[in-house]
Image (cartoon, grey):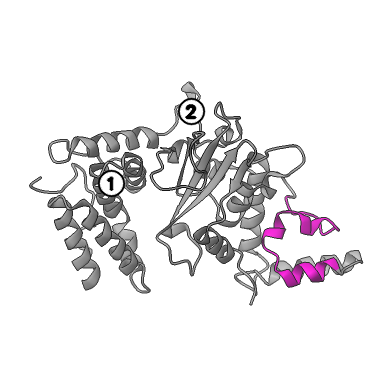
Amino acid sequence: MNRLVLVLAVFLSAGAVLAQPVQELFQKTKEQVKAGSWDDALKTMTALDAEAAKPGNEAFHKQLEGPLAFYRGVCEANLGQADKARASFQVFLGVQPNASIDPAMYSKKAVAAFGEARKASAPPDAASGGSPSLFVAYQEFKPPPNISDPPDEKWAEGPVQWLMTAQEKKTWAGLQAGADRVEFVEKFWQARNPTSDSADNAFKTGFERRAAFADAHFVQDEKKRGSLTDRGMVFVLLGPPTYGGRKPIRSDEDVDEQSGMTFKPVDQRVSPEILKAPESNPNHQEVWHYRRELLPKGVGYLQVDVVFITRKGYGINVLQRDSPTLTTLDAARMTPE
């Protein structure tokens, strides 16, 4: 491999200047990829991600999103991690949708993974019954009118429960009069208003829209709203993932083991209808991947993988409550000061 370029423009825009530490790490990444040092390159990219995410380097992080996703895909493909490589290439194609890869410069494994990512990222064909991604479906979602839950005695049992603090729940439980509940609800949302002097509460609007989407797409039985399921809770708090996937669970497989997963990346093709449809194999795990740019402020992870398990005798789409997931969800609750 004499040089590392894509047929179409991949890397930083002309004239862009990186901060010195970022520039050095980026150059080191390119040299390691060129030398075929795949593991070392991935470690350098992790350090580069962390450096680019520091305060003041936000613009660099955005510029590097595409190039690093591509380099990461190349490394993962050559390490035999085809599923991860496809997912990384899908992220890259989200930034550079018209880019291509030169088979004369990259390994067959990288080219194959890139091709699979290209297929998965292609817009769905309406004539063939293709379905939009969760992200696209959410962007196109038109919530019904009056989606706010009324401030009655059942208000705290709705999706707002994912936001309420222990003290707020205690205070709510002690309220009796309707006027007191109305006042509590008004103060509850005002405490979470990012612009306290504005009547337009973007946090409340976004929360209720996500809750309405979850109610429409994540219903698992007639007795529970979609926003009250585990997947609904995650969607209400974090929104649509960067990309997601699903794989069957074999009878001899530990449901808590995430290493070496070979799920099928579905990113741009994951459909709300598919997520509601019954599985031919009842035992499966579904993973939603959230890259740094979608994580709440204060979360230091480069990526958080949220895992849901469906297994006979275990439950349906049960959230695996690992430390990164719980930390991320707690940060998303935007607890008032």
Q: Is residue 93 left or right of residue 206?
A: left
- The location of residue 111, given as percent across then percent down, is 23, 36
- The magenta segment is 147-173
Residue 209 visible somewhere in the drawing = yes
Any mark on residue 76, and which?
1
Point 37% across, 43% down: residue: 87
Residue topped by disc 2? 130
Earlier residue among tags 2 and 1: 1
Q: Is residue 217 left or right of residue 254?
A: right
Assess whether residue 171 is covered by the magenta stretch.
yes
Q: Quadrant of the C terminus?
A: bottom right
- The location of residue 37, given as percent across then percent down, is 17, 53
Which residue reaches farthest left? 2
Which residue reaches farthest front? 252
Crowd rating for badge 2 (residues with CA inside 10 Å; few <14, some 14–19, many 20+): few
Front one among 322 and 313: 313
Question: Mark 1: which amino acid?
Answer: Glu
Q: Give how far apart the Cα atoms at labels 2 and 1 are.
A: 28 Å
Labels 2 and 1 touching (C-beta < 8 A) = no
Q: Is residue 224 above or below residue 305?
A: above
Q: Is residue 229 left or right of residue 22?
A: right
Front one among 23 and 314: 314
Point 27% across, 41% down: residue: 80
